[in-house]
Image (spheres, rainbow, N blue to C red):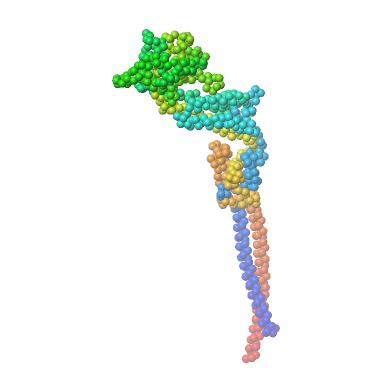
Amino acid sequence: MGMAAGQARLLSITARLTDNELRSQTITNSKLRLADKSSEASQEYMDALNSTQLMFGMYSENGDLNYQSLTANTLLTYGDLKNQYSLVNSAGQIMLNGSDIKKYEASNTLAEFLYSYGIPEVDNPKFYEALKGIYGSTTTEDGSYLYEKLYDENNPNQWKDYFSAMTDNDIADLQNIVNKNPEDVTEADAQKFTNYVSNWASQVEGNPLIKDYANMGGSFSAYINGLLNLPEVEFPDENDPEFTDVSGDTQLAEKFNLASKQCYNNCHPPYSGSGQECYLHVLAYLLDYNGDLSGYPKNFNTTVSGKSISVSSTKITGAAISSQREEYPVGSGNYVAAKDMMKEVSQYLWDPENGCMAPVDNTDTTTYESSTLEKLLSNYKWVDSDGDGVYEKTLKTWPERVIDTYYAVENRDDLGVSYESLLPILDQFQVDMETALSSIFNEERFNNAVKAWQEEMGRWLKEVSDLKAEYIEDLENIPDKTIPDETDARYQWYVNLYYRMGGGAENADGTKNTNNYKELDENLINNTEWLQFALENGILTMEQATFSENGSEKYPEIGTYDWLSIIYTNASDIKSQENETAIAIAEVKYKNAMTEIENQDKKYDQDLKNLDSEHSALQTEYDSIKSVIDKNVERSFKAFS
C-alpha cells in the first residue's frame, strides 16, 4: 500500500474511533438517565401507594352501610337514611346545584318549595284549632261548628270589617271625650258611652250568627264581650253633696235667715197673722222677685204636667217681709230692708249661671207613677228629654222646687194633705235653703272625679283596642288549611334547606335575596378530586343539620334543628381510604415504565458491546497501518541518508 493511501486510511480509522468514543459516552449518559427515570417511576408509584380518597357512607334500605367516592352531588342529594350536610364557601354561602336554586326562587312559600320536591299536601289540623281559638268550639243546630259559618276563606276579614264599620267612628268620638279636659266634659258626653254601647249591643243581638256572643268563646267572643261590657262607673253628678263644701256663714244664707224668720215663725203654731199662709209669702219672694210689682200676677208651671200657680202682688206686699228691717250684719247697728235681702236671694236662685239645684236625696222613692203630691214634694222630676216616650228621673232646679212647694202649700186641700203634714216639708225647705245658699261648689274635686271617670273609660277603650288587636292578630296568623305532609321522610330535609337558603327573604323589589347561596359549577358537582382538594385546603367548609331541642337562634323557623359548622374529618359519614384506582393506574404505569427502561438498558448494553468490538477492530487495523507507515518512513530516511 502507498504511503498516501495508508495515511488516508489512518485518518479515516482515527475519525471512526473518535466517533465510537462519542457514541459510547452518549449511550453511557442515556443509561444514567434511565436510572433517573427508574427513580421517578418508583416515586410516582410510592406516592400512589400513599394517596387516600374521601369516601361517603350511606345506608341502603336493608341497613347495609356502603361507601362511595365523596362528591358534592353525593353529599347534597337527599337520601332516606342520610345525615344532611351543606358545603359552604368563604362568604358563608351554601353551594347548591341549579335545580335546588330554581325551585327555591320559584317558590313564594315554604309549602310551595316542599311541594316542588313531591311532598304530599294534607289537611292541617292547626287550621281548625286556630279557628276554634278565634270563634270558639260551639256548635249550631245542624251539628256543625259555628266557626264554619263565621269564617269565610274568601273573605277572612268579614267580621273585622263588620265591627270596624259599626264601631270605629263611635270609638273615635268616645276617645275624644276621654282626651278632653275634665272641665269640658258634659253629661251629654258621658251619655254617649251608654248610647253607643247600647246601639252596638242591639246590632250584635240582632245578628243570628253572633247574638250568643257571651257563650261563643275564643278571641272574637272576648272582643265582643269587652266591647259591650261598659264599666259600671257613673259619670259624677255635680249636684252630689260630695262636691259641695258648706261654710255655714255665707252672706246669702244669713240674709235669707234674717229676712224670712218672721214669716217662717208665723207659719208654725200658735199661728200668728195669716198663719198657714205665711210661708207662701216666703216662697213668693223666692219666685223671681226683682222689686218690680208691675209684672204681677206672675204665672209659673210646676214640674207636674197641667199644674201651675199664679202669684199676686199681695203675696209680696202683704208679707211681713215687705216692711220689716233687720240688722245686718248682726251687731253692726246697720239695718237693711228684708225685701231687699230676699230680692238678692231670689235673683241668685234664678240666675242659671249659678246652677242652683235641689239637694240630692238618696232616700227618694218616687216613680213616674207616683201621685201628684209625691212628685211635687220630691226633689226630682220626670222628663222625656229625647221625646222617645221614656221619662228619666232628674234633679229639680231650686226655682222648680220653690214653684212645686208653693203649689203644694196653696192647694193642700185639693191634694188631700193637712197643713200639719206639710210643716216638716217646710222646715226641711228652710234648712235646705240655708244650706244651698251657704254652699260652695268644689270644682277641683268635681273635675278630679270627672278625670277618674275618664281614666276608667280610657282603660275600657284600651282594653277593647287590645282585644280587637288580639283578634286581628289571631285572624292574620291562621295557618294554611292544607300543608305539606310533615310525616314525609323528606319533609325535615327540605325545611332545613329552605331556611338555610334564606327562608324566602326578598329584596325591596320583590326578588329573592340570594345572599345565602350560590350555584355550584355543574362540571364540579361530580368531581371527587376537586371536592377533596377544596375541603383539604379550606376553600370549602361543611355544616350539618343537627337536632336541637331549643332550636336555632339563627334559623328559629326551622324548629328543633340547627345548622352547625363541622370539620369534614369529624363527619361520621366521611372517611379516608387508599385510592385503589390511583394505585392500580400507578402500578400499571410503573410496570410499563420499568419494562421500557429495562429494554432500553439492554439495547444500550448491546450497543456498547458492539461499539467496543468495532473499536477493538479499528484499533488493531490502526496499529497495523501505522506500523507499515512507520517502516516505510524508516526505509525512506535510510535511502536518502
Residue 314 location, x and y as percent?
42, 15
Left or right position of 421 against 40: left
Q: Quadrant of the C terminus?
A: bottom right
Outermost residue, front direction? 294
The front one of 125 and 559 is 125
For image coordinates 55% across by 32% down, the residue present is: 469
In the figure, residue 29 lies in which quadrant?
bottom right
Q: Is residue 254 above or below residue 487?
A: above
Residue drawn 37% across the image and 10% down it: 272
State whether residue 504 is above or below residue 5. above
Residue 23 visible? The answer is yes
Q: Quadrant of the N terminus?
A: bottom right
Pick whichever, 11 or 228, lies toward us.
228
For the point 61% across and 62% down, the residue is 36
Looking at the rendering, which quadrant does residue 594 occupy? bottom right
Q: Nearer the viewer, residue 569 or 351?
A: 351
Residue 512 visible here: no
Number of numbered markers: 0
Residue at (34% x, 18% y) in the render:
325
Quarter of the image holding residue 21? bottom right
Q: Position of residue 400 (x, y in %)?
A: 46, 19
